[in-house]
Image (cartoon, coloured by chain):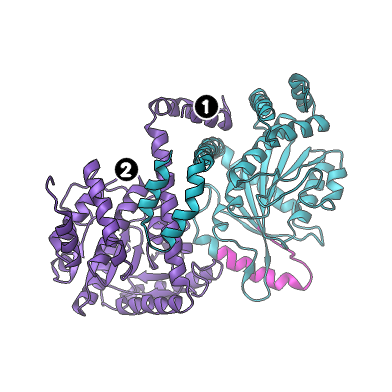
Chain colours: A cyan, B purple
Amino acid sequence: MPDVDLEALIQGIIGRNRRMIAKAMTLIESRVSEHQQMAAKIMEKILPLTGGSIRLGVTGVPGVGKSTFIENLGIYLADSGQQVAVLAVDPSSKRSGGSILGDKTRMEKLSAHANGFIRPSPAGDTLGGVAARTREMMLVCEAAGFDAVLVETVGVGQSETAVAAMVDFFLVLMIAGAGDELQGIKKGVLELADGIAINKADGDNQDRVARAKKDLENAMHLILPATAAWHTPVMTCSSVVEKGTVPVWETVLKHRETVKACGEFEQRRKNQALEWMWTLVDEGLKQMFKNNQQIDVQIPVVSNQVAKGEISPSAAARMLLSYL
Amino acid sequence: MPDVDLEALIQGIIGRNRRMIAKAMTLIESRVSEHQQMAAKIMEKILPLTGGSIRLGVTGVPGVGKSTFIENLGIYLADSGQQVAVLAVDPSSKRSGGSILGDKTRMEKLSAHANGFIRPSPAGDTLGGVAARTREMMLVCEAAGFDAVLVETVGVGQSETAVAAMVDFFLVLMIAGAGDELQGIKKGVLELADGIAINKADGDNQDRVARAKKDLENAMHLILPATAAWHTPVMTCSSVVEKGTVPVWETVLKHRETVKACGEFEQRRKNQALEWMWTLVDEGLKQMFKNNQQIDVQIPVVSNQVAKGEISPSAAARMLLSYL
């Protein structure tokens, strides 16, 4: 990308030109310092145009039917005339250009839809880096006038926390297990949820789903809600009979109305922006630490000594910091 | 403390001389650079003598009867001939010397017991600092041959996470609420628990406690245990009728046996030491960042701009980091 006309690129984004949007996202992803500077300029220019989309995060472990749910929801919105973008946060992805959310065959219908736009997870070494790039891509989609941005995560590492920290509504998809256990719950994730949907509520699975719903509702009584004005509902949905997708979306809209009315919407977005800043500062500090060659050599040595109890963690930390 | 004879101090610690132990802890707490260097020397000397105590963490919001529970347990252990130390992590405490766990009237019996030793929460600006000092105090107690170290936290900020990261067993105390809700649950704390005890299980409260126990047991099915080999039990206890304290302690011992048999005990302690090292490194990096005067001046300015949406979090983070 040697000759990028920044002004043309920005106008292309604003005009919702998909090729230009993709080009801007490629700059955001690039590790070339010159590209990063261009991406930073684009972000500053489009910042005043951002903030208008409904930002929905969706998580769930593999097997809960996350992609099908997102595609069904995306097509429902796109068919009703709304512009829908799907992004993903997957810190484990080592993709090379072209694959869609890690898998070319996924979300075929939505990616072919005139109102749909799909972009796979950006590559990156750290979750913070992947999340920061996804967040900037989300802002590009907002400047382009997308009505809804759906951010998917596969739940590797702390990626749910990263996605919950960039969306207005965080949806946790689950399925009922074979016994009285619920599948698809990861530590800490219930506490991030603005809504829970038990998927695959169809056929002979419905009894199990009803039991799971009751268990989850009880559990949610024991967990403080992510937003004071909103009690996290437990819904059911199904992709087979195509039911549930619309009620889930209506819950997202209802939540939006509730938190906008009491001011928590604005507050959450402000807090998210500040938290993001601090996450990037932390990342920057750690990067600086790990880029120091002496420290890089010492880390495995002192880690081993600490694990064996030969030196104290305090002495090890002091030693590592002393190289700065 | 101008003339500290380090060798005498270390011998005093090993001989379980309470005055010497308290003196070492005062050095650990001090912000005077010379004292910190002495404390670091003491820690390195006693490190080989540490690791022998049962490390029990206890949390619970104010009102659950935490101090009474800890004192009852402490006296039970002390009466049976064991040496018991009680430490505390309270990042909100602004104590001046002399108060005991923030309140002179608390744990009077245990502090007067020949086998008991009580030290209030060290003062500190950051949770990491308070936790690090408490952890070093715990190691001093171990070198002094205490059989059990009980670490209390009031649950301010992330202090439960900090305490769970330094103990072998993390006990969460709760009480049953008036309705079908449970009081005394803080976000994320159930996931740290190796055991839960519902306190005040006496008198006309017993029905509510039984219901709360069932609800919590259901909830714990939805949460991954802190240790794979151990399913977090929900117990009940009472200080009024003095029942429950001994069964809770027996559960701690049973847990110890289980995790030692499968190797998770050693692994947890190793991981805790490494995590502690990284926490201290993070603290050190952040301290360095905040000690920079230009950055200190800029933080409120850019935070305000980010909150107002005038500059992006990325640009703000880049700007702050550029001053290093």
Q: Which residues are magenta?
A: A197-218
Q: Is residue B64 above or below residue A12?
A: below
Left of A131 or right of it: where is B163? left
Q: Is residue A211 magenta?
A: yes
Give the spatial CA distance, label 2 vs label 1: 26 Å
Left of B51 or right of it: where is A27? right
The residue sitting at 38% across, 38% down in the picture is: B287
Q: Is residue A89 above or below residue B86?
A: above
Of A292 and A122, which appears nearest the observer? Answer: A292
Question: What chain is tagged by disc 2?
Answer: B
User: Residue B202: horizontal and vertical position, in percent?
Assistant: 31, 75
Of B147 and B106, which appears nearest the observer? Answer: B147
**Mark 1 — residue?**
B319
The residue sitting at 61% across, 41% down in the picture is: A129
Question: What chain is tagged by disc 1?
Answer: B
Query: On residue B125, which mark appears?
Result: 2
Q: Which callout, 2 or 1, points at the residue further toward the start of the chain?
A: 2
The residue sitting at 19% across, 78% down in the picture is: B79
Please name the amino acid that badge 2 sits on: Asp
Q: Is residue A239 above or below residue B36?
A: below
